[in-house]
Image: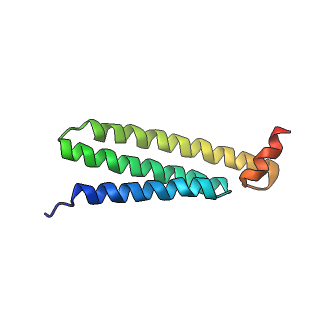
Amino acid sequence: MNQVEPWVVLSFSSIIFMIGFTGILIRKNILVILMCIELMLNAVNLTFVTYSTLLQDMAGQMSVFFIITVAAAESAVGLALVIAMFRTLRSVSTEEIQLLRE
């Protein structure tokens, strides 16, 4: 089986990370921001797995396991907060969160 070059995978991972980071900076919808955070976490996971394969060490893959676990908990808590905010404000825009401070 042909193996993909590590620089290709790392370049792809960095592109995915930058798409997620740009989405966080540009978007105003909390659900989209949460998806962008998940995209960034998956890019980091891909990097960990690539380096783990290159170095023949399982530590990177073990880190990925824990990152996926934390990401699942983060998305569950984030979705619960979005639902609570939508019930209060009838919107999921980040601009509406500023109204909760007053």
Q: Indicate the quadrant where residue 92 lies.
A: bottom right
Residue in the picture at 34% in, 51% down: 46
Q: Which residue is pictured at 70% across the width and 49% down the height?
A: 83
Residue 29 image point, x, y percent: 67, 57
In the drawing, does residue 102 fall left or right of residue 74?
A: right
* 82, 29: nearer the viewer: 29
Q: Residue at x 27, y 35 (%)?
A: 59
Q: How many marks?
A: 0
Between residue 24 and residue 32, name the one nearer to us.
24
The quarter in which the C terminus is drawn is top right
- In the image, taking residue 49 as reference, residue 95 lies left or right, namely right
Quadrant occupied by the N terminus: bottom left
Q: Position of residue 65 (x, y in %)?
A: 36, 40
Which residue occupies the foreground of this view, 8 or 46? 8
Relative to 68, does residue 29 appear above or below in the rendering? below
Q: Is residue 67 left or right of residue 11?
A: right
Side (left or right) of 82 relative to 3: right
